[in-house]
Image (cartoon, grey):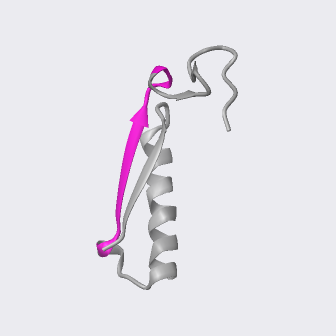
Amino acid sequence: MPIIFVEMWEGRTIEQKKELVKGITDAVIVAVDVPPDHVRVLIRDYAKHNWAKAGKLASEPDFVPG
């Protein structure tokens, strides 16, 4: 049973998340030959003030993602 974890900044719509989990599920079905009901996708949304890189919060104006 594949379990896929997605961590991203908050702000996506429910429709975007539905499209994301459908695409991930379809890719896993093909890649590892499992039925759709065996695929689990868990999404964790983070507020930008809870995400940091190189000592800078993502909510800071000079934050450079990547």
Q: Is residue 7 magenta?
A: no
Looking at this view, name the residue that lies furthest to the front.
55
The one of 52 and 22 positioned closer to us in this rendering = 52
Indicate whether 8 appears above or below 27.
above
**Residue occupying the far bottom of the picture:** 33
Q: Residue furthest top?
A: 61
| x, y percent for residue 13 | 47, 38
Left or right of 50 on screen, residue 35 = left
User: Which residue is located at x 39 percent, y 47 percent?
Assistant: 43
Residue 64: horizontal and vertical position, in percent? 70, 27
Q: Which residues are magenta?
A: 38-49
Horizontal placement of 21 versus 52: left or right? left
Residue drawn at point x = 50 percent, y = 54 percent: 20
Q: Which of the pair 61/10 is nearer the observer?
A: 61
Query: Total label count?
Result: 0
Residue 42 percent across, percent down from the top left: 35, 52
- Looking at the image, residue 43 lies above or below residue 1: above
Going 36% across and 75% down the picture, which residue do you hit? 36
Residue 26 rendering spot, x and y as whole percentages: 48, 71
Quarter holding the N terminus?
A: bottom left
- Rendered residue at 44%/67% (across/down): 25
Determine the image quadrant of residue 37. bottom left
In the image, taking residue 52 as reference, residue 36 lies left or right, namely: left
Which of the 4 image quadrants contains residue 62? top right
Against 32, residue 27 (above or below) is above
Q: Which quarter of the rendering shows the C terminus?
A: top right
